[in-house]
Image (cartoon, rainbow, N blue to C red):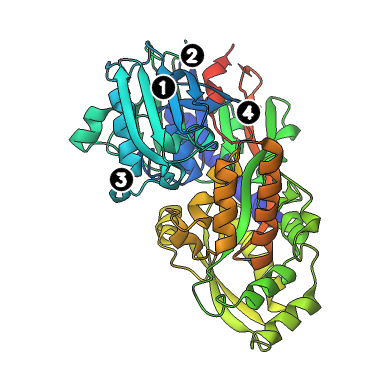
């Protein structure tokens, strides 16, 4: 691996030199942040995108009604205030009267209503639709008020509204059918141009109601891999970069001119099984896979130990000791026994899909899992895919197994209802549901007492780990690297780059 890594660095240094030569003729302004990442957005529709690379870009352009701060507290965005009714069945927002879209139009209650109606329309294929199915109607009584009328109390809905998948978009753009073909939001930056897999150019939005950002814009380069990004940082062609590969991130502190930000995230690495395909239809087979996986070994091998073994619940308020969950201590003999009970003592063959580059550790994770499952007779073929192909395949649920990095949420219901409820809009990706999961999700949705909610979701987590439709592995970190003259970035456990609104570039 050492020789391979050195070869990659040699290539990357040459690439960075070429990048420098290409930019000499048009030097970046001192007030423009030169940024880099290795995975580009796969699309511009905030309601449909699931890839982290897309969300990181769209969070700078679009805004939801409310957002989470770095402490996972709900704070204003387009809405300046909000209130649940006493019975929890009405949620009322007052919009910021200064909020404007980047086309100059004021953000109105009609835009909010049209946006959520679009999310709820099954034809849209919205990623977060299941979070909002309790909305019965939306009233717009005046020019700054939006009232969501709910079929039942829905405590997690407010948290779900912090996602960019719940972004408010112009009603006029919905009507014109242009959502996804251009990006017109109310956020801190305008997307001036996008050359897929090459670069994005963003400029500061002077009409952003959230205040004045400290840079004129952000020029994002999409570099071929993260060693190229590190080389470009070292040669000062890049000011700020998103790093996903811990192998690269751990090298950043070796550079005197660079700083590394390392923040635990809610997103989780997982081996997704497809319980609708034989033999994963058998619970004993799924449990055998869980027992055969050494989660800590996968973490140590693929991520250099840069993370923590986790159960399904990754948010601090609900997270518990994963050691208490079913078969979190590797037990190969128990795995073999379960395989025999299910009629697969001689094992079986299956294919696992993984995306090239997101996460960068996907191939390594798949290889370790392949080796571990071979010990109980499972012959795993690894199929690597380009990210956009992987996302399309994943959304169709067209796989035996999938190595995935899935987003976390501050609330368990808004994190998982799309997978583990009977009307979840990504239920066809999970391909598993039972009455226990569905009913516990519903209980947690309507319960307002925080202690009782924690008990409900602890039961949910225990049951989910036992029936083993997926094998949760671990959580990692989000990394950003920057030159020492870049100040003010605020990282978040959600992985958002919204903290770039506070960044300044000095001499």
Q: Which circle, 3 or 1, is nearer the viewer?
A: 3
Which of the 4 image quarters holds residue 151?
Answer: top left
The secondary element bearing badge 3 is classed as loop
Quarter of the image where the C terminus is located: top right
x 63%, y 42%: residue: 266
Q: Residues within 10 Å of mark 3 (few under 14, many from 20)?
A: few
Residue 277 vertical position relative to residue 247 in the rendered view, above or below: below
Residue 303 appears at what percent x and percent y? Answer: 70, 51
- The residue wearing badge 4 is 491
Please identify, in this view, whether the residue under mark 3 or under mark 4 is nearer the observer.
Answer: 3
Could you say where residue 259 lies in the image, as x and y percent from the top left? 69, 27
| Rendering quarter of residue 412 | top right
Label 2 to label 4, Cα distance in Å? 16 Å
Mark 1, secondary structure of its residue:
strand
Q: Mark 4: which secondary structure? A: loop
On the image, numbered disc 1 is attached to which residue?
189
- 494 lies left or right of 26: right
Vertical placement of 257 versus 465: above or below? above
Q: Are marks 3 and 4 in contact (CB under 8 Å)?
A: no
Q: According to the image, label 3 marks what residue?
A: 121
Q: Which residue is mark 2?
A: 213
As measured in the structure, the alpha-carbon distance from the residue carrying label 2 to the one carrying label 1 is 9 Å
**Looking at the image, residue 275 lies above or below residue 215:** below
Q: Earlier in the sequence, mark 3 or mark 1?
A: 3
Tell me the quarter of the image containing the N terminus. bottom right
Q: Nearer the viewer, residue 254 or 333?
A: 333
Q: x and y percent of residue 30 in the render?
A: 50, 14
Q: CA distance from mark 3 to mark 1?
A: 28 Å
């Amino acid at each position: 691996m050492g020789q391979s890594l050195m070869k990659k660095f040699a290539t990357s240094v040459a690439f960075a030199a070429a990048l420098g030569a290409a930019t000499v003729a048009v030097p970046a302004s001192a007030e423009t942040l030169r940024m880099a990442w290795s995975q580009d957005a796969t699309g511009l529709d905030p309601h449909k995108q699931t890839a982290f690379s897309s969300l990181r870009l769209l969070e700078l352009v679009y805004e939801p009604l409310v957002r989470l701060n770095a402490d996972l507290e709900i704070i204003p965005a387009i809405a300046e205030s909000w209130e649940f009714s006493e019975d929890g069945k009405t949620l009322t927002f007052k919009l910021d009267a200064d909020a404007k879209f980047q086309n100059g139009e004021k953000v109105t209650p009609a835009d909010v209503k049209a946006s959520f109606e679009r999310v709820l329309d099954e034809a849209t294929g919205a990623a977060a639709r299941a979070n909002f199915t309790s909305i019965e109607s939306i009233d717009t009584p005046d020019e700054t008020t939006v009232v969501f009328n709910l079929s039942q109390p829905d405590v997690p809905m407010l948290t779900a509204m912090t996602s960019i998948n719940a972004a408010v978009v112009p009603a006029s753009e919905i009507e014109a059918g242009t959502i996804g073909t251009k990006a017109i939001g109310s956020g801190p930056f305008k997307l001036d141009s996008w050359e897929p897999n090459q670069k994005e150019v963003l400029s500061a939005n002077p009409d952003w109601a959230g205040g004045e950002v400290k840079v004129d814009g952000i020029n994002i380069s999409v570099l071929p891999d993260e060693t190229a990004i590190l080389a470009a940082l070292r040669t000062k062609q890049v000011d700020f970069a998103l790093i996903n590969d811990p192998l690269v991130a751990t090298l950043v502190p070796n550079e005197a001119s660079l700083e590394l930000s390392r923040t635990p995230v809610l997103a989780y690495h997982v081996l997704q099984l497809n319980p609708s395909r034989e033999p994963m239809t058998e619970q004993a087979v799924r449990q055998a896979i869980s027992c055969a996986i050494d989660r800590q070994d996968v973490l140590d091998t693929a991520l250099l130990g840069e993370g923590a073994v986790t159960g399904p619940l990754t948010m601090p308020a609900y997270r518990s000791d994963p050691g208490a969950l079913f078969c979190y201590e590797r037990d190969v003999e128990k795995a073999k026994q379960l395989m025999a009970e299910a009629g697969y003592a001689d094992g079986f063959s299956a294919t696992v899909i993984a995306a090239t580059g997101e996460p960068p550790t996907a191939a390594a994770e798949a290889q370790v899992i392949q080796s571990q499952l071979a010990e109980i007779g499972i012959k795993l073929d690894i199929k690597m895919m380009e990210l956009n192909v992987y996302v399309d395949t994943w959304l169709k649920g067209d796989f035996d197994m999938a190595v995935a990095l899935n987003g976390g949420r501050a609330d368990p219901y808004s994190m998982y209802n799309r997978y583990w409820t009977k009307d979840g809009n990504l239920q066809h990706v999970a391909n598993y549901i039972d009455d226990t999961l569905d009913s516990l999700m519903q209980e947690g949705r309507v319960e307002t007492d925080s202690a009782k909610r924690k008990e409900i979701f602890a039961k949910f987590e225990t049951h989910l780990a036992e029936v083993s439709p997926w094998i949760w592995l671990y959580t990692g970190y989000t990394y950003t690297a920057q030159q020492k003259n870049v100040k003010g970035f605020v990282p978040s456990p959600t992985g958002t780059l919204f903290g770039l609104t506070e960044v300044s570039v000095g001499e």
